[in-house]
Image: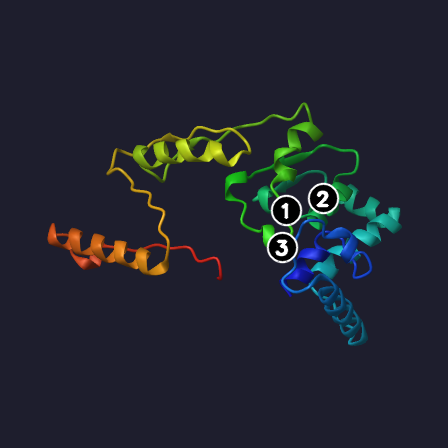
Amino acid sequence: ATEVEWAKNRRLTPEWYLDGIGEHEPPIPAELMQRVFRDYERRKEANGQVDFEDLLVTAIELYERDRDALGVVQARYRAFTVDEYQDVNLLQQTLLELWLGERDDLCAVGDDYQAIYAFTGATPRHLLELPERYPHAVVVRLEANYRSTPEVLSLANRLVPKLGGAGKTLRATCPPGPEPVAKALGSLADELDVVVERVRALHAEGVPYEEMAVLYRLNAR
């Protein structure tokens, strides 16, 4: 299902799937994935159903085919704001460009370092290339951070240039705190050992268990 979503967000049909995947590695052999994709589309059409990507595709096809319908939208909506622009995919970007037409009345907000929807075909490229598409655009860098301590931001500022993307230097507004510790561990067991050791050490220093928290992000969810 994720692979079908990925393909459709790149405007790939089952017929063009093999030619369009490039270096992308599908979850099953490409020829088999193409057959699954084709069968999915066939069964969906036979049942008179559409999926979320179809809603975007059919809207794009309508506006590309019917200039009167597009004119209605362009006359009704004069300006657009796009939030989380780093997570826009090709279908969404195409729809936005159709809505805008020749105009440039666009406000986009985003952070390329927070792009998390690549698995659906989203890319921060649309955000990063916006000043190239609109050379006269006003770019406002929001670098004052109200969430993290100077120590955490200092670590982030040392790490993020290695990721590429837009240059930024985060500035702290919070008071100082403890130095963060970054560890690269080889296994889940090693991670658990480090967490347990830290919890025990904090508790031995007098920190109640109920004042501790373990935050984690899991790729599978």
Residue 44: x and y, percent?
76, 72
Circles 2 and 1: CB atoms closer than 8 Å? yes
- In terms of secondary structure, where does tag 1 sit? loop
Circles 3 and 2: CB atoms closer than 8 Å? no
Residue 1 as seen in the image, left or right of residue 216: right
Q: Is residue 2 above or below residue 152?
A: below
Say which residue appears at 71% left-offset and 56% top-offset: 7
CA separation in Å, label 3 and label 2: 18 Å
- In terms of secondary structure, where does tag 2 sit? helix
Q: Is residue 205 above or below residue 151?
A: below
- In terms of secondary structure, where does tag 3 sit? helix
Residue depth check, mark 2 versus mark 1: number of the one nearer the observer: 1
Q: Which residue of the protein is positioned furthest toward the top in this rendering?
A: 136
The residue wearing badge 1 is 88
Say which residue appears at 38% left-offset and 55% top-offset: 216
Few, some or many C-alpha atoms within 10 Å of disc 2 (few <14, some 14-19, many ≥20)? some
Question: Which quadrant of the structure image shows residue 42?
Answer: bottom right
The residue wearing badge 2 is 96
Report the disc number at residue 120.
3
Residue 186 as seen in the image, left or right of residue 195: right
Q: Earlier in the sequence, mark 3 or mark 2?
A: 2
